[in-house]
Image (cartoon, rainbow, N blue to C red):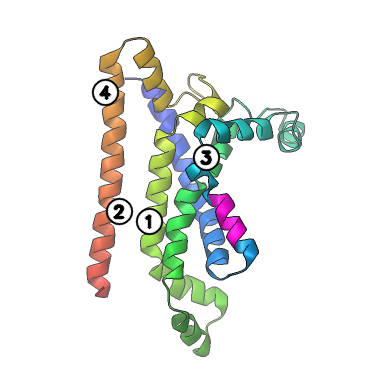
Amino acid sequence: MDWQAFEVSIKLALLTSLSLLPIGLGLAYLLANSKSLASTVIEALITLPLVLPPTVLGYFLLVGLDSSSVFGGAFFSLTGHTLAFSFTGLWFASIIYSLPFAVQPMLRSMESIAPEIREAAWCCGLSKCRTFFKIELPLALPGIVTAMVLSFSHTLGEFGVVLMIGGNIAGETRTLSIAIYDSVLSFESSQAQSMSLILLAIALVSITTVFLFNRSRSRVVGI
C-alpha cells in the first residue's frame, strides 16, 4: 500500500471539493436565475469535462498551465514556481475537471425551488442576500451535499488528467490512481488490489451516505 500516494489523493480531493463549494454555489445561483443564451453557453462549457476524453482535457489544461502561457507565465512571475507538474497545478486542474460534478447537483436543487418561495420571502422584507442564506441555501442542501461528495469521489479517482498535469512525482503529484497503474505495470497485483479496494470502499461509503442523508431529509420535510 502506497500511503504517500493515499495522503496526496485525500489532500487533493479535500482541497478540490472545498474550493468547489463557493465556486459551484456562485455558478449554480447565477445559472438558476438566468435564462439567457449566455447562461446556456456557460453551462455547456462547465459540462464539457463530462464528455471530453481526459487526455484532451488534460492537454488543454497542460498548455494553459505551462509557463509559456499567459496564466502559467503570470503565476511563474508572481511565485517563481511553475504550475505544470506541481501539486498546485494539479489542484487547479482538479477544480476544472470536477466542476460539473459540483455545479450540476447544486443547479438542479436551486432550479427546483419554486419562484413563489423567493417572492414570498421578499414580500416579508428579506433582501435577496438573506433570502439566499435563510431560504434557498437550506432548501438546496441535498444538492450541495451531493455535489461535495461527487466532487470528492471524482477527484479521488481521476487518472487521465492527473497523469497529464501532475505526472508521477512521489509525495507531490503521485495519487492512488497513478500508484495503482504503476503497480499493475510492475505486476504487483496484491498492492494494486489493496489500493483499488480502498478507493472502491471510499466511493461506496460516500455515495451511500449521500443517499441516506437525502432520504432522511425527504422524510423530515415530508416529501
Q: Are marks 2 and 1 in contact (CB under 8 Å)?
A: yes
Give above or below for 171 relative to 54.
above
Look at label 4 and name its amino acid: Ser
| Distance of label 4 from label 1 (alpha carbons) | 28 Å
Of pointers 2 and 4, the one earlier in the residue sequence: 4
Q: Position of residue 75 (x, y in %)?
A: 71, 35
The residue under label 1 is: 145
Residue at disc 2, secondary structure: helix
| Distance of label 3 from label 4 (alpha carbons) | 30 Å
Q: Position of residue 169 (x, y in %)?
A: 52, 19
* Image disc number at residue 194: 4
Look at label 3 and name its amino acid: Leu
Seen from the viewer's position, the closer of residues 97 and 131 is 97
Tally of numbered discs: 4
Q: Position of residue 153 (x, y in %)?
A: 38, 41
Query: Magenta stretch: residue 162 in it?
Result: no
* Image disc number at residue 35: none
The residue under label 3 is: 52
Of pointers 4 and 1, the one earlier in the residue sequence: 1
| Distance of label 2 from label 4 (alpha carbons) | 25 Å
The residue under label 2 is: 210
Residue at disc 4, secondary structure: helix
What secondary structure do most residues of the magenta stretch adopt?
helix
The part of the chain drawn in magenta is: 40-46
Look at label 1 and name its amino acid: Val
| Distance of label 2 from label 1 (alpha carbons) | 7 Å
Look at label 2 and name its amino acid: Val
Q: Are marks 4 and 1 in contact (CB under 8 Å)?
A: no
Q: Say left or right for 143 vs 75.
A: left
- Quadrant showing the N terminus: top left
Q: Residue at x 52, y 85 (%)?
A: 122
